[in-house]
Image (cartoon, coloured by chain):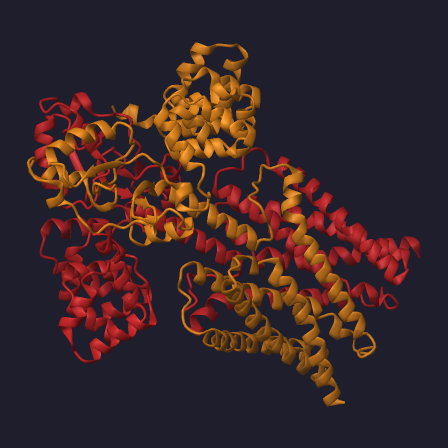
Chain colours: A red, B orange
Amino acid sequence: MSEELENIQFELTEDLINRVEGLIEKNDDKALQNLLKDFHYADIAEILDEISLEEAIYVIKLLDSETTSDVLMEIDEDNREKVLKNLSAKEIAEEVEELDTDDAADIILELPEERQQEVISKIEDEEHKAEITELITYDEDTAGGLMAKELVKVYETWTVAGCLRRIRGQAKEVTRVHSIYVVDKQEKLIGRLSLKDLIVAKSDQKIADIYISNVDFVGVDDDVEDVAKVMAKYDLEAIPVVDENQILLGRITIDDIVDVLKEEAEKDYQLAAGITGDVEADDSILELTRARLPWLFLGLVGGVGAFLIMEGFQDSFKEKAILFFFTPLIAAMAGNVGVQSSAIIVQGLANDDVRGSVNGRLIKEMLLAALNGIILAIFLFLFVWFYKGELDKAIAISVSLVMVIIVAGLIGTFVPLFLNKRGVDPAIATGPFITTSNDILGILLYFWIAELIIAFFG
Amino acid sequence: MSEELENIQFELTEDLINRVEGLIEKNDDKALQNLLKDFHYADIAEILDEISLEEAIYVIKLLDSETTSDVLMEIDEDNREKVLKNLSAKEIAEEVEELDTDDAADIILELPEERQQEVISKIEDEEHKAEITELITYDEDTAGGLMAKELVKVYETWTVAGCLRRIRGQAKEVTRVHSIYVVDKQEKLIGRLSLKDLIVAKSDQKIADIYISNVDFVGVDDDVEDVAKVMAKYDLEAIPVVDENQILLGRITIDDIVDVLKEEAEKDYQLAAGITGDVEADDSILELTRARLPWLFLGLVGGVGAFLIMEGFQDSFKEKAILFFFTPLIAAMAGNVGVQSSAIIVQGLANDDVRGSVNGRLIKEMLLAALNGIILAIFLFLFVWFYKGELDKAIAISVSLVMVIIVAGLIGTFVPLFLNKRGVDPAIATGPFITTSNDILGILLYFWIAELIIAFFG
């Protein structure tokens, strides 16, 4: 027995891929089926992501459609698109037939619009067809776009015994029974039950007497990020979805939320790094360029701005070239402080941790930036003074560093709060956007202040 | 009924907090209990995070210990520490008594070491005490540190009827029954069953005949991040934890994994923004300074380095001050490209997407950076040429920009791959670390190349 258990610890090795490719080349279908039959569909998907499109299609046509439909859901989106292009509408419909309604709707929505109706029309199960047709109408960023129609539903008028009997029927379609949802005659959600509650109850009890009326739910138009927050906060593993009349429409399970959270985190991380659009290390150079170049262009424009500022101050500092040599330092500090303060606000907003007044936030950041700025400025002052022996320049540079850091911190705090108020995703405020604007503003401020101080000593 | 449903959509308002504070001030315990009794413990925790420590302790002592133990788990870690300081060992033991073993162990581990044994010794339930004592021995970053001892376990020799009877007993302790784990006489994990399978089976069948031997599991010493990956990949809602002899020790549920994923994402995001240590917007200025200042100091050292480089090139470019005015641009581009390329590699490594040779990655990044660099350099060349009319400088600046971008991209790709090979978290490679080193190297490279090209034009 224990040997059988070891089996499932899957590892994607060069050797395994070579074996699969060898069997495909030899057209040894039997050996291939035999090799793959013990693998989880998520593991088969990993193999398919590593072999060529022709080989992947060969494997997909070889396996039974229950396995391949699950495999299809797991392979990389780009690869799935290519595979689907190579399958007929009838073949896709057969795969879709095997999937839960939420996955089925996702596959259909990935098809070009003209193929969507063709595939749907070829789905044989009328109920499945109707449910998918409903699901594809919802926005993918809403609860409706994430939910599945599969759920276990009982009416308040049923008895426990009748319930168990009918659940045996419904549950066959539902991979995992999290909660049993209780509805009234109008299909309105009125409560929930767990299988455990049903098993513990007496068989002649009415559902109306044992159900729990305190049930969390979300509206079909709610934003998926809000759904994720509710489920994470209340540790829910499934949540029912209702329409504006409380009619039970579907349910969302935690595994979909895990995917939402991961995607969300990756998107924010990429935005902070100056990458837009969901790209991966394995995407083509052109796709990566499209994701990266716009932000670099912003940086270029910022750099040209910095150039013009420095050129403008050229005459004021003819004999003080040293001041120009500190511009990279000033720009770097302004950028770093801005990113730090905006990242904390962006994260706080995402976690609903940022409450209280904007002014309070700004005052706190000002104190924090001033503290950090003064500590850093002391080091810089000592360096310039000892190394160059010019007190006026040492003062000018370190005082302006403090001012630049304070302003950068305030901008980093204010911009995401402002964007959030305006309904714009504050995550765009981190990364190159804040760095570039802080760079330019920092350099401008630096020269202004340095000019004033040196004139004063002059 | 539907009115009752609306209730649960909780919103934390200023008004609500004022009401709670008012009732505490008036010592109106009855009204306070009445107000809070319908709230979910996660909502009560949100309220407590907004009021003073004395007020929070007042509420905690007022509510029944089943509610307060759950509330305690949900409040902010800093606040929990303060609350626990104000409770006696006996009072903490009472709270711990009500918690699942995993949460109980977490609470105990947050106490100062000298109090841990004192609290444990005051736990009355001997089984709970033994389980917690076991759990606190595991490293918090391993499966053992995350698992709970609560699970539903059946022996292969039992019948379905006997099973259901005993499950009714075990299930009372287990909040949610995900899977029923099947063990042999030696307590070795040999398979699983779902409640659904049990309900569908005939009551005189043996477990040995109906269980599913294909069960995912993790080792007690496995890293939590690996556990999260397995559960996300296979869409699991719970996974059993075994020791090296396959003995079933506990189980991990998906809600704990959701927390791990969120923390991991937040840590990486903060690292990329130059913030270390798990800080929040509401932490004190001193805590935030400790998290931010070290990275700023790194930036300062980098800036001084840039200063020294520029000073060194001062004589070579006496009549070409314009070259110095482009250093912020060069530094910004080097930093941006470095962060972009490292972020993609760090994310790919986290998702196990980065396979194949390091050389292949470097060649791809070189091509990508060259493409982006050439496009950007053309704009820069045109700007300098038209604006200044100096062809030699326009060529010098734009050619070095391309070279700087390529080198920055290569460093951004190489460093995280190198750190990962060495077993260091590659996430530290994004953010200020890569920005600062790329800044300096970029500026150095820029002056070298510019010097060569301008010498060539004579």
- Left or right of A395 on screen, residue B335: left
Q: Nearer the viewer, residue A108 or B165?
A: B165
Percent x, y of residue A98: 15, 56
Q: Residue at x 67, y 51 (%)?
A: B294
The picture quadrant where one finds residue A86 is bottom left
- Left or right of B455 on screen, residue B45: left
User: Can you see residue B268?
Assistant: yes
The picture quadrant where one finds residue A49 is bottom left
Q: Residue at x 43, y 70 (%)?
A: A287
Percent x, y of residue A220: 29, 41
Q: Residue furthest right?
A: A458
- Left or right of A307 on screen, residue B155: left
Q: Residue at x 28, y 49 (%)?
A: A138
- Left or right of B327 on screen, residue B362: left
Percent x, y of residue B4: 29, 23
In this view, A147 is above or below B409: above
Q: Nearer the viewer, residue B148 or A205?
A: B148
